[in-house]
Amino acid sequence: MSLVSMTKITEWAAGLTLSIAPWLASTAFAQATDTQVQEGIIGGQAVQLILRLDNHGPSLSGYVFEQNGGLLLPLEETPLADSPEAAPDLSIDVTDAKGQPFAMLMLRSFRWTDHKLAGDWVDLRSRVRTAFQFKQTAMFGSGYAAVAYDGDLLQVGKSGPYLFRVHAHKARGEFGGLVDRIDVYDRASGSKIQTLDHLQLDFNYTDTLEFDDYNGDGHTDFRASRLAIDGSGNRSTGSRSYFLFLNGQFRDFTPLDKLEEDGTPWFLPHGRIDVRQESDIDYRNRLATWNHYRFTSPGTLTFTGSTQGPMNR
């Protein structure tokens, strides 16, 4: 029996898997949120628990991911009354697509640093409890030089019929993690369908990949920021690379990468793109040169002309 069956909410489950939106900042350095992954079984189902610790609160948020079927359930952000190193029993609401709690995770003697978690899944309608145990499989620190990590992390954006995991690593003394591989899975079956490797992307935790239909063909694509590393080993967020779904696979589409390097792109309906040329802005009159493009086919980007207009959209 699935977690959805346990809670009798099948009417919204299909929509939920396609409508989860990221709520954190767009760069790894801005996010500064420790993230860990725990895995276990709830009611016979393989489950991954993604927990995110915001030390400013402190508070805890994240997701429950049912690995058979690809169902992603958000956890309501929950304040920690005590420090995350020594918290009491902790209750976290699990919410539906409308943000309404339907279940609760009860973690016994919760400590952020524990490698194992135990507790109960509580159906808020029936009050039935299901015991669980989780084991930590990955821990990603918040980017400080003293933190090291190496592991895979699920991406939580609107990724359509696919699931994406990024492999990120960072050694002690480095600022910012590096993503060198992306694994793509079929959401329904859980089967891996593609691996993109030999990458050098900036790690932004569960929001490393930004999903959208960038060429207007109705398929979900994604983009990610590159990681720039200078001769001294210093790291910074670079321009973005675009991966379009073409001929059944995700491919780096270099014409879009080039537009990103040349200016600031605005993506419009029906595969149209306006690019503001950053080297040709009249700040006094607040005017800019805009280059216009459109996709004449899913894999063909065509320049259609230039105009001058307001610098801001």
Image: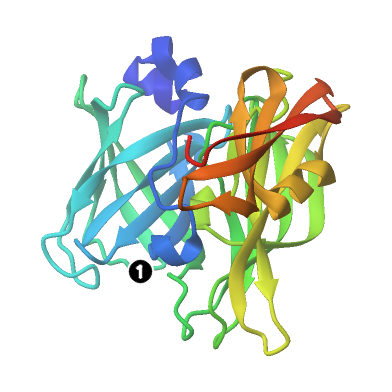
Amino acid under label 1? Asp
Residue 290 in the image: state x and y as whole percent.
Answer: 65, 38
Residue 219 in sight in this render: no
Q: What residue lies at 71% left-to-right and 23% top-to-bottom?
A: 271
**In the displayed image of the protein, which residue is found farthest to the front?**
285
Where residue 49 sits in the image (x, y, percent)?
A: 43, 48
Q: Nearer the viewer, residue 282 or 160?
A: 282
Extreme residue toward the left, this view: 81
Circle 1: element type: loop
Q: Residues within 10 Å of mark 1 (few under 14, many from 20)?
A: few
> In the image, 78: left or right of 266?
left
Q: Is residue 251 left or right of residue 92?
A: right
Answer left or right for 60 relative to 240: left
Q: Is residue 206 above or below residue 189?
A: below
- Between 272 and 82, the residue placed more toward the observer is 272
**What residue do we see at 47% from left, 61% from top?**
136
Residue 32 image-quadrant placement? bottom left
Q: Nearer the viewer, residue 170 or 202?
A: 202
The total number of labels drawn is 1
* Residue marked by disc 1: 114
Q: Considering depth in this image, is 106 or 52 the residue closer to the camera?
A: 52
Provide residue 301's location: percent of width, then percent of height: 83, 31
In this rendering, would 216 be left or right of 90? right
